[in-house]
Amino acid sequence: MPELPEVETLCRQLHESVAGAAIKSVSVYDKKLGGIEPLAGRAIRRVRRLGKTISISMDNGKSLTIHLRMTGRLFLHSQNTKPPHSRLRIRLDGRNIDLIDPRRFATVKVLPETVITSDNDLMESFSLRQFMERHARRKVSVKTLLMDARAFAGIGNIYACEILHAAGIAPEKRADSLTPEQWKTVLRHARRILKKGIQNRGTSISDWRDLYGRPGENQNELKVYGRAGKKCLRCAGVIVRVKQAGRGTYCCPDCQK
Ligand SMILES: [Zn+2]
């Protein structure tokens, strides 16, 4: 599933490649997407990420918002053929942006441009105080809380495992047992790891591709995810895989307490 680094990668690449371009037409290939307000003739002003949503601002004060959900991705190309699983095409001058989405959960809407303050977004105006008040005392595991979209935007299973390994915190440890100092450590590593994910254009464990169809490179940087049975890169321990809330969780029992 595309998480914060993958969505941010797409938004940056889109902004670089298509800001200023005019939309010639939009074709919806999948009826499940529903009707989309006509956009022909509109110019793209800017592209930015709002949580896990891609917001493409137009010159009429509206924004085309795309949420990729499970398997959605955007592909910029200049071919005439339709790539497999393409659900929507935005035609620009000689180029197309296709929404490719095998499982068809992605959503596309045209909405009035709104200013959203994202207090759960570690790369934006995250409020530590608000987080401590609203979430830090919850009686769930720290990993479950990291992956809860109400607390943090765009941290999925892979990034949560990496953050907790870096912070030396066991994934099943209860969120309400962490001290404020421990939370600061977790959040510091979370920011660093998400930032590195963006620099590496996302993590391509399965089907993630960037705007140009290239895999990301962050899978080469993973320190714990997918390394069961291998030596911990930080201590003499061995990485194990456990099931937690139905998800494969990787951790080092020796240095994550
Ligand atoms: Zn270790």
Image: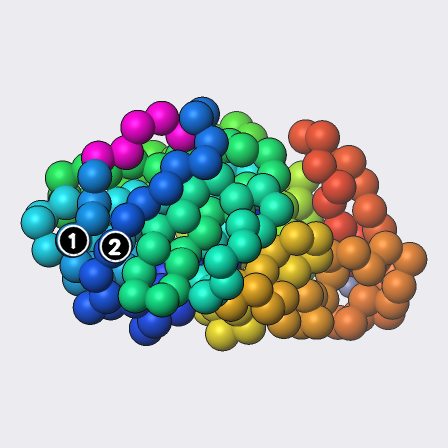
Q: Nearer the viewer, residue 77 or 136?
A: 77
Give yes or no for contact between labels 2 and 1 (Cβ–Cβ under 8 Å): no
C-alpha gap between disc 2 and disc 1 = 6 Å
Give residue 175's position: percent from left, percent from top. 53, 39
Q: Which residue is mark 2?
A: 24
Q: Check residue 78 in the rendering and tell me which mark sits there, or answer none.
A: none
Q: Does 35 lie within the magenta span?
A: yes
| Magenta stretch contains residue 58 | no
Question: Where residue 14 appears, x then y in whole percent?
Answer: 36, 64
Q: Residue at x 21, y 35 (%)?
A: 37
Check disc 2: other Cα within 10 Å, few if <14, some if 14-19, many if 20+.
some
Q: Position of residue 62 (x, y in %)?
A: 14, 45
Magenta portion: prevailing SS class: loop
N-term-proximal mark, 2 vs 1: 2
Q: Quadrant of the N terminus?
A: top right
Residue at left offset 70%, top offset 53%: 206
Q: Secondary structure at mark 2?
A: loop
Residues rendered magenta in the picture: 33-37
62 or 138: nearer the eye? 62
Q: Which residue is mark 1?
A: 41
